[in-house]
Structure formats: C-alpha cells, structure tokens
Image: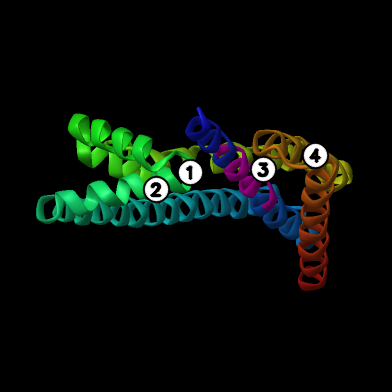
Amino acid sequence: MSQKLNILRAGVLGANDGIVSVAGIVIGVAGATTNVGTIFIAGVAGLVAGALSMAGGEYVSVSTQKDTEEAVIDKEKLELANDYDGELEELADIYIEKGLSADLAKQVATQLMEKDALAAHSEAELGLQLNDFANPWQAALSSLISFSLGAILPLLTILLLPPGIRIGFTFVVVLIALALTGYVSAYLGEAPKRNAVLRNMVVGMLTMLVTYGVGTLVGV
C-alpha cells in the first residue's frame, strides 16, 4: 500500500514539474511576442524535452536503485551459503534488538530461516522484499505521462485565450493547479498541507514572474 502511495505521490510531483516548467516557458515567450505559433512551438518543445528528461532521469535512478538492491541480496545469498549459523545468530540479534528475549528471538529466527532464509534476512536486515523491485520502465513511463499531463494545462490555457488576457489568466490557472498538486502531495505524504500549498504557489509564481520579465526584456 505504501509503495502505491509513493508511486501516486511521484506522479503528482511529476505533474507539478510539468505545470511549472512549461508555464515558465510559455509565459516567458508570451512576454516577448504575441505570436501564437511561436508560443506553441516553444511550449511543445518544452513539454517534449521536459517529459523525456524526466523519464530518462527516472529510468536511470530506478535502474541504479534496482541494481544496488539486487547486488545486496546476491551478497546476502553468498553469506548464507558460506556461514548459515552465523547468519542465524545475526538474525536472532536483530529480533533481540527489537525487544524479544534471546530464546524467543532464536526460535523466531530459526523458524523464519527454515521457511526462507534469504527472504527472512532480506526483510529483517535489509528492509527489502524479494521480487518486489521497482520497474525502471514503468517508472519512466509514469514520469513521462505525469509531466506531460501537467504541462498540457498551461500550454492549452495560453494558446486558447486572446492576447489581452492570456498571460494573466494563465497565471491564475497555474497557481490554482499548483495549489491542488501541493495539497495532494502533502496529503499523500502526511505533511502539513498549508505549507506545501503556499510553497508550491510561491515557487510557481516566482518562476512565471522571472520568465515573463526575461521575455519582456528580450522582446523589446
């Protein structure tokens, strides 16, 4: 259940990145020009580049984590093969540290290792579940989709509105969306919601103000 919540929270944060990144791009370009074609090209380029960057980064990160976890488990296999009794004592010590008596800890460790020694050590010593590794491709696809969905919001908003109101309205829409993603991410992470919402909105607002200012200066 906690892993599913982490995946969902990562998806929300990916959408948040998409909103902020592309909002900054399109508002910056809109500050320089009212040409819809130029804004569209810049926004789409930012969406594609950002989504691929997020997906690639997530793939590399999760692949590295998976490789590390598999290497640690392979090492544990070797230790069990070479020193079963020593590993039994080590597992018993773990349960003693958790509050069991020495006799009960030895009994629990013995029964668990008789059933599945590698699983017992992986869970108690390493905090890992066997055959429950994160999928790098799934993580990459999730990041790509969540970033793209978030990025579409400011892109469509600024493209579909007339020049006179497009920038101001996009500001408002983006800030509302960031308030929502901040609230959801805080809720899933059981963190203070007010701080998360305000922090998210301030970062988004500063990003848009700075890029708009740069666009205005460059466009003059």
User: How far apart, in angstroms, are the residues tagged by discs 2 and 4?
Assistant: 37 Å
Does the residue at mark 2 contact the one at mark 1 (Cβ under 8 Å)? yes
Q: Give amino acid for label 3.
A: Leu
Q: How would you classify the magenta stretch by its main secondary structure?
A: helix
Q: Is residue 175 left or right of residue 83?
A: right
Residue of label 4 = 193
Q: Residues within 10 Å of mark 3 (few under 14, many from 20)?
A: many
Q: Residue at x 22, y 41 (%)?
A: 118
Q: Residues within 10 Å of mark 4 (few under 14, many from 20)?
A: some
Does the residue at mark 1 contact the one at mark 3 (Cβ under 8 Å)? no
Q: Residue at x 30, y 34 (%)?
A: 107
Residue of label 1 = 98
Q: Is residue 108 left or right of residue 180?
A: left
Label 3 residue SS: helix
User: How far apart, in angstroms, are the residues tagged by discs 1 and 3?
Assistant: 53 Å
User: How far apart, in angstroms, are the residues tagged by discs 3 and 2?
Assistant: 54 Å
First along the sequence among labels 2 and 4: 2
Residue of label 2 = 94
Residue 161's image quarter?
top right
Confirm whether residue 132 shows in the render. Answer: yes
Label 4 residue SS: helix
Q: Is residue 77 left or right of residue 156?
A: left
First along the sequence among labels 1 and 3: 1
User: How far apart, in angstroms, are the residues tagged by discs 3 and 4?
Assistant: 27 Å
> Which contiguous range is marked in magenta?
11-20
Query: How far across and how far down the image is residue 123, in percent?
Result: 35, 40
Does the residue at mark 2 contact the one at mark 4 (Cβ under 8 Å)? no
Residue of label 3 = 155
Seen in the picture, residue 15 relative to 43 is either above or below; the reply is above
First along the sequence among labels 3 and 2: 2
